[in-house]
Image (cartoon, rainbow, N blue to C red):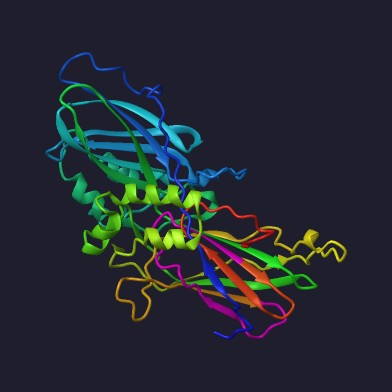
Amino acid sequence: MKPNIIHSTVVCLAAFTLPFMVSCSSREESLPDNVTEAALCLNIATIEQTRTSTAELPDNEKMNSVRVIVLHEDGTVEHNRHFSLEGAQAQKTILLKVRPDEKKKIFLFANEESVSTVEGVTSEDGNQALSAFFNSYTEGMSGIEVAVNNLYFAPDYSDGKPIPMSSMYEIDFPEKGNFNGTFHVVRVATKFMVNFMNWRGEEVTVKSLTLASHADKNFLMAHVTDSEQNRQLFKGETWTDWLKRVSEASSVDDDYATTEAAGWLKDYELPEKANKEMTYIHDGAVTIGAPTVDIDYPDNSKPGVAEKAPAFYLPESKNLKAGAADGEQEYTLTLNIAGRTEPFVCRLPNLKALFRNTHVVVNITMYNSNEIVVDVIPYGEVKLDPIFGLG
């Protein structure tokens, strides 16, 4: 890596979740009236930022529909319910009548309509929409747990399509009383935002931006390996609870040391048929304006920024770093800038994994010396002021 191309790369992590502890006032069913039924209150929420921000979560990152599948202890379907929401929502409360005094598994899905075709399931025409798969399992049927864990698909994040989300929880329903819990759905996607800060004396045009190497297909349900590495990472928690906890910690302190102390979820699986060597190519050039320089009051000077910073979604990926024994990954960003024949190439260090729901913010600062400073802030819903970047 040439020093006049990439000056330094700093990585900080922050993942943010908002626990929604709300009452079950949105009732889909009336309370049970006999001892063979009880009430299951599900407060379903997306994983998102907790820090104060004026930025509204985009509608495609919220829930436009929710499906709840509840399994009895023997694996048969107790409920398979689909709920169309009134607009995009980050939280939905659902009340269901259930059988008490048994272990249950709860599968949650959001935005299933965005998945036109699923693989890993046998159908008559070999081409089945996710909703059709779900609707084929009615109350009392068995086998859905194995089937749903085999599903994979090629995500389509274009045109603002709502991002598919999923999760699974296990609960012990009491013999007497009801159950009220908060459950999070996890986006089957990763998000990249690229902020440019231009300190050169003129505007700069980035002719092309690419990112390698990402996958093209994801499992619908996360395939997190039951390994010693993950057991050491989670310390008795589920991976969703671990993600929620480190998200909250990162929202308080997004310094990279905080993230490194929390660890990285690196041991997970992608579909065998996934192509892991795809390259994302940003559509169109990006023009970054010239800086505003105040000679008398330098602190008032501001770098030029792009009118619209590139933002894009990619599948969960796993590009292993050469020689890494613990599953560490690496991803390469390439910029072609007008007026230069040599591209800027940066292998993003310290972005050690690209597990689902990761949000990577890349801040690129340009100087007159042809020097570029790349600051990478991955993991979660990070919002930084693109004018100032990192201190």
In terms of depth relative to the viewer, which is nearer, 170 or 255? 255
Q: Is residue 265 visible?
A: yes
Q: How many marks?
A: 0
In terms of depth relative to the viewer, which is nearer, 120 or 254? 254
Q: Is residue 13 above or below residue 236?
A: below
Q: Where's residue 290, x and y in %?
A: 78, 67
Residue furthest to the right in view is 296
Position of the C terminus, as image quadrant, is bottom right
Residue 322's image quarter? bottom left
Q: Is residue 227 above or below residue 93?
A: below
Per the rendered image, the range of residues in magenta is: 337-363
Position of the N terminus, as image quadrant, is bottom right
Main SS of the magenta part reads loop
Q: Residue 288 vs residue 112: left or right? A: right
Task: Please tell me whether residue 282 belongs to the stretch shown in magenta.
Answer: no
Q: Residue at x 67, y 79 (%)?
A: 371
Q: Residue at x 64, y 61 (%)?
A: 389
Q: Residue 100 vs residue 164: left or right? A: left
Q: Where's residue 328, x and y in %?
A: 36, 71
Residue 169's image quarter? top left
Q: Is residue 99 above or below residue 9?
A: above
Q: Where's residue 182, x and y in %?
A: 35, 35
